[in-house]
């Protein structure tokens, strides 16, 4: 039986037993957040956690705007980072895009990035002496909290424009 997401069959989705929000939630929660959490106990899993979590930032902007990021991937990534981390400076955001997203995606390694886990002497997510410091476990927790709030807002029904944008992007995804 083909599955639309890890726990929902295409048949159940087509029958209306599950809706697009259910599919979205199950895909993101299982394929992204649960996998990152499985890696989290390993002290060297920081790069893998970031590799799993970073696509969320671009994709969440797609859902929020109701548009595809094609041709504007970096702009969508920037906006998604700002959604999840509203107090993030533009300098830190740009360095994350360059060093983490592009560096890791294109070279499979970070260049000027130092990863740590709750080290009190370094920024959780910031620049120190020209180096981007990132606590991947903190980034994972904040991103997952953002996701939980977003799904709750979609289901809540108090934000029809949010649901409309979500549905618009789901239609784009279904047409691919």
Image (cartoon, rainbow, N blue to C red):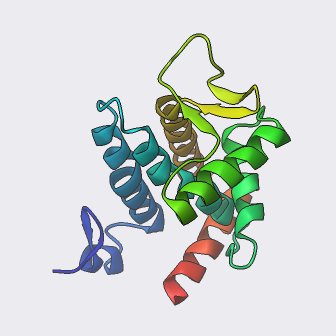
Q: Which residue sits at x=34%, y=29%?
A: 43
Q: Which residue sits at x=52%, y=49%?
A: 151
Specify the farthest residue to the left.
Answer: 1
Q: In the depicted view, which residue is nearer to us: 136 or 173?
A: 136
**Residue 3 drawn at (x, y percent):** 25, 74
Q: In the depicted view, which residue is nearer to us: 163 or 25?
A: 25
**Residue 146 drawn at (x, y percent):** 58, 40
Q: Is residue 158 left or right of residue 141?
A: right
Q: Quadrant of residue 19?
A: bottom left
Specify the farthest residue to the right.
Answer: 90
Relative to residue 155, is residue 8 depicted above or below? below
**Residue 73 drawn at (x, y percent):** 70, 69
Relative to residue 123, is residue 5 depicted above or below? below
Residue 58 visible in the displayed image: yes
Residue 163 visible in the displayed image: no
Q: Is residue 79 left or right of residue 18?
A: right
**Residue 92 drawn at (x, y percent):** 76, 38
Q: Which residue sits at x=70%, y=54%?
A: 98
Q: How many marks?
A: 0
Quadrant into which the N terminus falls = bottom left
Q: In the depicted view, which residue is nearer to us: 151 or 119?
A: 119
């Amino acid at each position: 039986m083909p599955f639309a997401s890890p726990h929902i069959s295409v048949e159940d989705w087509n029958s209306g037993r599950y809706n697009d929000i259910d599919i979205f939630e199950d895909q993101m929660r299982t394929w992204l957040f649960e996998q990152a959490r499985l890696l989290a106990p390993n002290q060297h899993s920081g790069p893998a956690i970031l590799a799993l979590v970073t696509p969320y930032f671009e994709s969440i902007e797609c859902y929020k705007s109701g548009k595809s990021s094609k041709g504007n991937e970096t702009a969508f990534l920037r906006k998604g980072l700002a959604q999840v981390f509203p107090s993030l400076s533009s300098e830190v955001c740009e360095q994350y895009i360059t060093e983490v997203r592009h560096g890791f995606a294109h070279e499979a390694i970070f260049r000027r990035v130092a990863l740590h886990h709750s080290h009190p002497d370094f920024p959780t997510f910031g620049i120190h002496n020209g180096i981007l410091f990132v606590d991947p476990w903190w980034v994972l927790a904040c991103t997952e909290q953002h996701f939980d709030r977003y799904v709750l807002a979609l289901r809540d029904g108090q934000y029809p424009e949010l649901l409309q944008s979500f549905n618009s992007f789901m239609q784009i995804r279904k047409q691919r």
